[in-house]
Amino acid sequence: MNLLITPSFEDIIAGYQNTAEDNDRLFHQLTSLTWSDPILGGHRRHVEDNKLGYGDAAFHAMWLRLLDYARKRFGQISLLEIGVFKGQVISLWALIGRNWDIDVRITAITPFEGRPMPRSRLITWIRSRFDFKFRENLRNGNFYENCDYEAVVKKLFGRFDLDFWKVRLCRGYSTDSHVQLELSNATFHIVYVDGDHSFDGALQDFKTYGPKVVRGGWLVADDAGSFIPGSAFWKGHEAVSRAVNILPEIGFRNVLNVGHNRIFERV
């Protein structure tokens, strides 16, 4: 079914200004639009109830509108997520594609493994005091429990009767040479960066995968809102928020901010 989407992405960006008032208003508006839609709200509720991801409910309504706009501009759309975790975003993309007749081609970079904290509190304290990289990873939320992430993602796809096997998986980290080689000739209409939250890690993802966005496409930076005005939402990580400043230098302009998600169009 092809459901009417209102307000559209075009409507939202036409009057958008990066002010505290606009950012708070938009965040509340999109949150309400997610919960009022049974498809989006049902997916987000399942994610929250089963601890399958982070972010905010507003992002579901944001993604619907961005994918709809991309469909109008490009027809079939190619999507890349860096940092799958438990599959919230790629399953949402697949769900939107099916229910709103959007032809999506999804690529995902993920190691399907955790990075657990040391079990010893003493070791954690010592490393946080003397190991800068460890301290940065701790501060920026780069630790995740060990579990069978692939099984978790497959189960989430199955819960909504989505075809997991249509996702092109690049198994590894975005910095791995074999992943970069596999995607060396790839281009995308939308790239979502939600991987390493350190400054150097985020910066490298922007520099490596930003140029793969076609002109007129978008890069969406997660956890990058530390320096934007507004008080209704969590703003992300300071390191990622600094790294995102490279994007105008490599051909992007900021067209919209939704909570700690920042949307940049390649010009």
Image: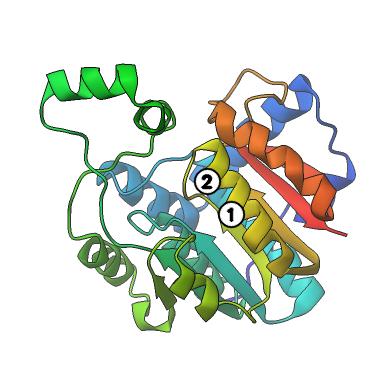
Are dots 2 and 1 in contact, CB under 8 Å?
yes
Quadrant that contains the N terminus = bottom right
Left or right, residue 102 beside residue 45: right
Q: Is residue 163 left or right of residue 78?
A: left
Left or right: 45 as drawn, with respect to 82 = left
In the image, residue 36 above or below residue 168: above
Q: Residue furthest left?
A: 120
Residue 164, given in percent of the width and then of the height, sits at 35, 77
Task: Give the Cα distance between marks 2 and 1.
Answer: 6 Å
How many marks are shown on the rendered structure?
2
Give the camera-side residue of 134 and 240: 134
Residue 236: in sight, yes or no?
yes
Q: Nearer the viewer, residue 36 or 78?
A: 78
Q: Residue at x 53, y 67 (%)?
A: 96
In the rendered view, tell whether residue 131 sits above or below residue 217.
Answer: above
In the picture, residue 169 is in which quadrant?
A: bottom left
Tell me, yes or no, if residue 62 can be seen here.
no
Of residues 124 and 193, the one nearer the viewer is: 124
- Position of 92 with respect to 210 (left or right) is left
**Figure quadrant of residue 171:** bottom left
Label 1: how many Cα within 10 Å (few below 14, some 14–19, many 20+): some
Instruction: Residue under label 1, please give it.
Output: 205
Residue 175 image point, x, y percent: 49, 60
